[in-house]
Image (tube, rainbow, N blue to C red):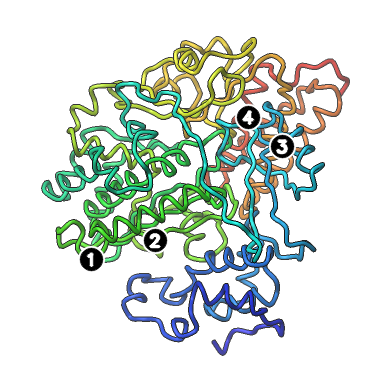
Amino acid sequence: MADLHFGTEQPTAAEQAAIDAVVAPDDAATVSESERLARGGRARRHARRHLLLPMLHALQHRIGWISPGGLNGAAERLGVPPAEAYGVATFYEMFRTTDPGHRDDVVHVCVDPACALAGADDLQASLAGGGARVHPSPCLGQCDRAPARFIQGVDRPDRVPADDDEVFRLPQAGEPGLRVLGRVGEVDPTSLDSYRAHRGYRALQRAVEKGPDAVIEAIRAAGLSGRGGAAFPTGVKWRAVADELGPDKHVVANCDESEPGTFKDRILCEHDPFALIESMTIAGLATGAPHGWIYIRGEYPRATARLEGAIAAARAAGLLGDDVAGSGLRFDIELRRGAGAYICGEETALFNSIEGFRGEPRNKPPFPTTHGLFGQPTAINNPETLVNVLDIVNDGPEAYRSVGTEQSPGTRLFCLSGRVGAPGLYEVPFGTTLGELLDRAGGPVGRLAAVLLGGAAGVFVGPESLDLRLTLEDARAAGATLGSGVVTVFDDTADMEAVVVRIAEFFRDESCGQCVPCRVGTQRQYEVLVELQATGGSMRPKRADLVHDMARAMADASICGLGHTAASAVRSALALGLIGQGDGNT
C-alpha cells in the first residue's frame, strides 16, 4: 500500500471495533489465492474492496456517521484509496460524512406519491413535534401501509432490542391458485422445517435429478420473463451464462426495489425467504455458478434478518456449501445491503456497488452474461422471477403456461397503493384487466382520475384504460408498461401537479450524474415543472416542446434506464391533461 496516502485522522476505539468486526486485522494481512481467483479479473487488484459497503454500514451504525478517522481506518484496512472510499461513502443517502451533532435515531418518512396521498406531511409534523429526528425520504417500499417510516438506528449501550411484532395478512390469503404468494402468510419464515412442510426444497431435489440442461430448457419452454421491469427471457439469460467457460460465475438476486410504489420483493423476502434461497440455488446449479449474492435495500431490516437466517439454516442443513443437497456441486450465498440509491437497482450499478465502487451504471456491451459481477459471467434476476422457477421445476412448463396468455404466460405480482380500497400485494394471471385488478383490491376510492402503471418510470393511464389487459404485449401496444408491477391509484382530489413535480424531483435526486443527458435533463425537467406549478398550471407550447425535446435526448443518449424513462410519467401526464391545463399566465 505504498502508493496509498492517508490523512492523519485515526478511528476511535468504537470505530476500530466496527472495522475489526468486518475484517479482522489478521485477515486483512493476507488474501488467500482462492479468494483472489474467486474475485477474478479487475477484482484481483481489489480482493477485499467488496467489503467496503459492509464496513461503511458498520461505521454509520456504530456512531451515526462516517468520520474522517473512521473512513481512513476502513480504507487502510481494505487497501482502498481514501479519496475513492470517500466517493463511495458520499454516493449513498443512508450514509453521513459530516457530524450530525447528535447520536439519535433518524426517522425516514416517505414523501413519494402513495405516502403523500396518505398524509406523509402530517406524519412528519407529528414526529418532529414529538422530538424525533425526521428525514424526508424517497419510497421506502411500504406503500401498502402508507404513510411509511423507517428508523435508521445508532448503536447505543442503552438500546433495548425491539421485538419483531409485525402483524401481516396478505389480502388474498387462502385464495386458491396463488403460485408465487402461495406460502406467504402460511409458512413460518424463520423455520426451514415449516418451509419443507410446504413443498420446500422439492424443486431443488428435482433440479439435481434433471440436470442443468433440462432445468434451463424447462425455464425456456415455460416462457418465464423477468419481473423487474425489462421482461427479458429468463431461460435465454441462464443459457448464456451456462455456456460461458470458466469456474467462476455468479447468480445475483436483485432485491434493491426502489421504484416508488414497489414493495413485492420486501414481502417475498420477509415472508418466504427460503423460496428465494432455494430458487437461487437452482439457478446456480443450472448455470454452473458457485457464487450467489443477494443485494437488498438498506431500508429493509426485517427482510435482511429473515434472509440471513434462511441462509444460515440452509447452510447448516447442507443445502448451501461445498456439496449442495448431496449433489457434489458447490453453491453458497453472500448478502449485501444497499444504502439508499435508486440507481443501484440497475444491474451494472448494483455490480459496482457490491464490488465497493460508486453505484454507477456501466456501458453495455459487454453484457452481464459474459462480463458481470467482478467481470465474470452473471445471471441476475428479480426475486419474483426466481421464485417462479420453483413451480416450473416442480410441475413442468405446460402447467406453468396453463394460465396467462401465449406471449405472457403465468401470473404476475402487482403492488396496489393510493386511493384504492385494500392496498397490498396481489397475484393475478397475466391477461387480467386493470379494472378487474382494482376490483380485487376493493375498487377505487372516490372518483378515479388516473392510475400510474410501472411506478415513477412508468406512465399514467386514465379511467378509459380500465379494460386494458395486463400483459406485456397489451401494455406495449397501449404505449404503457407493467414495469415492476406498480399500480398507484389517484382520485380527482389528488393534486396531480404536485405528484408529477415530486416524480421529476425524484429522478433529479436519484440520477447518479455520470452522463450529461440524464444529469442535466432531469434537473431541467424538474425546473420546468416547478415553473409550471408556480405560474398557475398552464403550459405554453414552447415549454411543452422543451419537455419533449429533453425526454428524447435523455432516452437517446443516457447510459441506463433511469435516463431513458425519467420523462415517461411526465409526458403521459401532459398527454392525459392531468397537468398543464391551468388558467395561469405563463
Considering only order in the chain, which callout, 1 or 3, is on the residue closer to the N terminus? Answer: 1
Cα distance between the residues tagged 2 and 4: 33 Å
CB within 8 Å, label 3 to label 1: no
Give the structural element (helix, strand or loop) at label 1.
loop
Considering only order in the chain, which callout, 3 or 2, is on the residue closer to the N terminus? Answer: 2
Cα distance between the residues tagged 2 and 3: 39 Å
Residue at (47%, 52%) from the top-left corner?
A: 304
Q: Name which residue type carries label 1.
A: Asp
CB within 8 Å, label 4 to label 1: no
Give the structural element (helix, strand or loop) at label 4.
helix
Q: Which class describes the residues within 10 Å of circle 2: few (<14), some (14-19), or many (20+)?
A: few
Residue at (65%, 33%) from the top-left corner?
A: 147
Cα distance between the residues tagged 2 and 1: 14 Å
Considering only order in the chain, which callout, 1 or 4, is on the residue closer to the N terminus? Answer: 4
**Residue 330 figure quarter:** bottom left
Q: Name which residue type carries label 2.
A: Glu
Of 458 and 178, nearer the camera is 178
Cα distance between the residues tagged 4 and 1: 45 Å
Which residue position is annotated with label 1? 322
Considering only order in the chain, which callout, 4 or 2, is on the residue closer to the N terminus? Answer: 4
Residue at (26%, 42%) from the top-left corner?
A: 235
Q: Return the x and y of residue 345 as percentages of the image width and height.
A: 51, 47
**Residue 230 figure quarter:** top left
Considering only order in the chain, which callout, 3 or 4, is on the residue closer to the N terminus? Answer: 4
Give the structural element (helix, strand or loop) at label 2.
strand
Which residue position is annotated with label 3? 525
Of 4 and 418, nearer the camera is 418
Give the structural element (helix, strand or loop) at label 3.
helix
